Amino acid sequence: MSARQAAAAALATAAGLGAIVVDRLSRDGAADDTPLVAGLAGAVTLGFAVLVFAWALPRAKSHGGRASSMALVTSVVGFFSVASAWTGLPFVLGTGGAMLGTAVLRGTASSRQRAVGTFAVGLGLGAVALAIVTVWFG
């Protein structure tokens, strides 16, 4: 993983964890389970970050055949997880899908795979953008 990719992975993970903190601090307070829920959401976010950035991304670079499918699935799940942006998952999955999509674009010559990779990049970036709006205004 390059330094730029590592920085993007760290920033996405930090943004996801920050979304959890912002959500928990902006609540009206009466919930007794706030630390437990925040801890679980943080653990899930970190788990997905490790899965996407430490396992899926290097695997996609070395095994190019299914990388476009992996990029698309990651971006789609990231996009649909915007509804629960407080968990931090859209930041990790959207960024991961976009990074997987760029790996597809750099490593394949098939027009179908390039199209899927391009769509995954756009959808992943859209998931991150919508998550930012959701956390900021939600």
Image: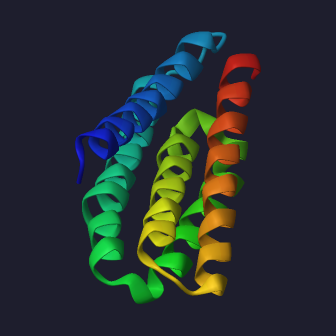
Residue 46 location in percent, x, y?
Answer: 33, 45
Looking at the image, which residue is at 35% across and 42% down? 9
Left of 55 or right of it: where is 21?
Answer: right
Colour theme:
rainbow
Q: Position of residue 61 (x, y in %)?
A: 32, 72
Give the quarter of the figure containing the N terminus. Answer: bottom left
Q: Is residue 29 visible?
A: no
Q: Residue furthest front?
A: 109
In the rendered view, tell whether residue 74 sits above or below residue 135. below
- Taking the spot 50% from the left edge, 21% from the top edge, the residue there is 32
Q: Quadrant of the C terminus?
A: top right
Residue at 53% x, 69% y is 71
Residue 36 occupies quadrant: top left
- Using the image, determine if residue 6 lies above or below residue 57: above
Locate residue 60: give its quadrant.
bottom left
Is residue 90 visible to us here? yes
Q: Nearer the viewer, residue 58 or 32?
A: 58
Residue plotted at (35% across, 50% down): 49
Residue 77 point in image, percent of width and height:
62, 62
Residue 6 percent location from the top left of the image:
27, 42
Instruction: Indicate the quadrant where residue 43 lies.
Output: top left
Number of numbered discs visible in the structure rendering: 0
- Who is closer to the viewer here, 61 or 138? 61
Residue closer to the observer: 82 or 23: 82
